[in-house]
Amino acid sequence: MKIVFFGDSITDCERDRSDEKSLGNGYVKILADKLLPIYPDTDISLINKGVSGNEVCDLLARVQQDVIDLKPDAVVIMIGINNTLHKFKYGKELNLNQFKSDLTELIKRLKEAGIVVIFLEPFLMPAPDKLRMRKLFDEELAVISDVCLKLCDEFVAYDEMFNGLSVSIPYTEYSLDGVHPTHRGSRLIADTAIKAIRKHLL
């Protein structure tokens, strides 16, 4: 079974783009180290196609070459945080209608290619400099939830999970900047994503 991981820096995690087998040092690598030993007699191929800084429109632009042409059985997507971050960092407007259209088209193209789509919800933890982003991010999450619950095979929610944990545990245990996960945060992503993936292992 071939699984492609598709997303932004949280997926990318310093992978070596010249090495197709490089999984980076984030949740994808942790997930691989947990998943592969469970199925020693199953041919499972994991490919990391995360690119730091990507938004949903970027994934749509490269989905054919980086996912569909590889003919995977499943794709694991985590995307969306940069659509909010770039509004505050660069002044780039987030048009939620266009966002919804791009996300819908992305998932539909994957489904039309016969690929199982597992969507991992983006998240934003309560770092002081990120609090002003919360309202817009919540609006974006509402769009993501609406689209993905209708179209995806699996949808794994992380935003409420991480923010719930941050009530009793400092958010910095899971992310120093509220966006990029620490090793502990990446482990949590991997542990929950693996449950969704295992439902679809061939």
Image (cartoon, rainbow, N blue to C red):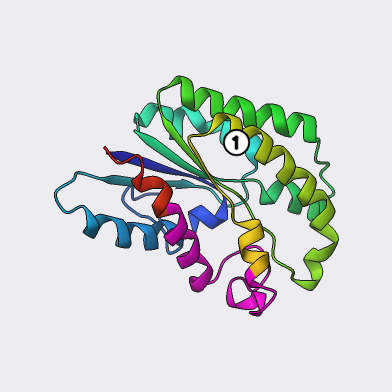
Q: Which residue is mark 1?
A: 148
Q: Quadrant of residue 165?
A: bottom right
What residue sits 45% from the left and 53% below the top? 193
Q: Classify the position of the N terminus by image quarter.
A: top left
Assess disc 1: are there few (<14), some (14-19) or many (≥20) residues with their C-alpha within 10 Å of its C-alpha.
many
- Looking at the rendering, the stretch of residues picked out in magenta corresponds to 165-193
The amino acid sitting under disc 1 is: Cys
Q: Nearer the viewer, residue 149 or 132?
A: 149
- Residue ranking furthest to the left: 41
Q: Secondary structure at mark 1?
A: helix
Is residue 47 visible to the viewer in this orientation of the structure? no
Residue 78 image offset from top left, x and y in percent: 55, 47
The picture places residue 159, in percent across and down from the top left corner, at 65, 57
Rendered image quadrant of residue 69: top left
Question: Looking at the image, which residue is at 80% across and 69% down?
Answer: 129
Residue 195 lies in the magenta-colored region: no
Does residue 113 appear anywhere in the picture? Answer: yes
146 lies above or below 108? below
- Report x, y in % for residue 91: 85, 49
When asked about the image quadrant of residue 182, the answer is bottom right
Determine the residue positioned at 63% across, 79% down: 169
